[in-house]
Amino acid sequence: SILKSDDGMIWEDYSSDEIDDIHLRCIALLPDDVLLIGTIYGGLFRSADYGTSWLKLTDGIYGAKVWDVIHDKTSSRTYVSMSNSGIFSSDEVGLAWMDKNGGLVATDVRSLIVNDGNILFAGVYDVGVFRSYDQGQSWERALTGMEGATVLSMASKPGNLYAGTLTRGILVSTNNGNTWSSTGDIGLWVVDALEIGENEEIFAGNVQGKIF
């Protein structure tokens, strides 16, 4: 379900028939208040009326399981990662898409982020991290200290890039992904979600309901 709140105190169900029972995974706000949601069973949906109605997106994009969707304000480009379909981008507020898989050796992409250096990073199941300096036209591995990791989530603040993994907790890079190291035992080894707070705190959580 999708919940809506004006102040964060009171929430109301904002789902509709188009997106019932398809397991919401991720959400992104685009320009002109366009909303995109990625689902586990139904693909990618778009709303231009604040969630009142939803359109399933199929132009240039394929796959039922969406892992992540992000909007890069610097380039005005939107990126989506799909299970076994790789990465897609849109310059048309989500209406049409192109695949961005050149150089990716694996396409089960679980997480995406653009850091403060305008580098696009992709976390891939069982492979680690790839990075792109040209908005997804080409990719290279960024693996030292990351070998064999499954990256489920990513977050960035100036100078630091964080990767939440399936079995190794949180890894951090201070050099745009050239090398990675552990942040230590935080009591959470499966990290499905990462977020940087307004005071640069790091929040981590997983589907079991643990939040740090």
Image (spheres, rainbow, N blue to C red):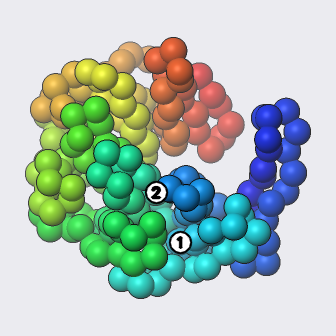
Q: Which residue is mark 1?
A: 44
Q: Earlier in the sequence, mark 1 or mark 2?
A: 1
Q: Which residue is mark 2?
A: 69
| Quadrant of image for the C terminus | top right
Say which amino acid is labelled 1.
Leu
- In-front residue for pair 70/127: 70
* Image coordinates for residue 157, horizontal then vertical, percent: 36, 25
> In the visual, does 46 lie left or right of 12?
left
User: Image quadrant of residue 114?
Assistant: top left
Element on which disc 1 rests: strand
Instruction: Write the residue at 58% across / 33% down.
Output: 205
Instruction: Write the residue at 84% across / 57% down.
Output: 13
Element on which disc 2 rests: strand
Label 1, label 2: how far apart the Cα atoms are: 9 Å
User: Image quadrant of residue 83?
Assistant: bottom left
Label 1 with label 2: CB-CB less than 8 Å:
yes
Q: Is residue 36 above or below residue 177?
A: below
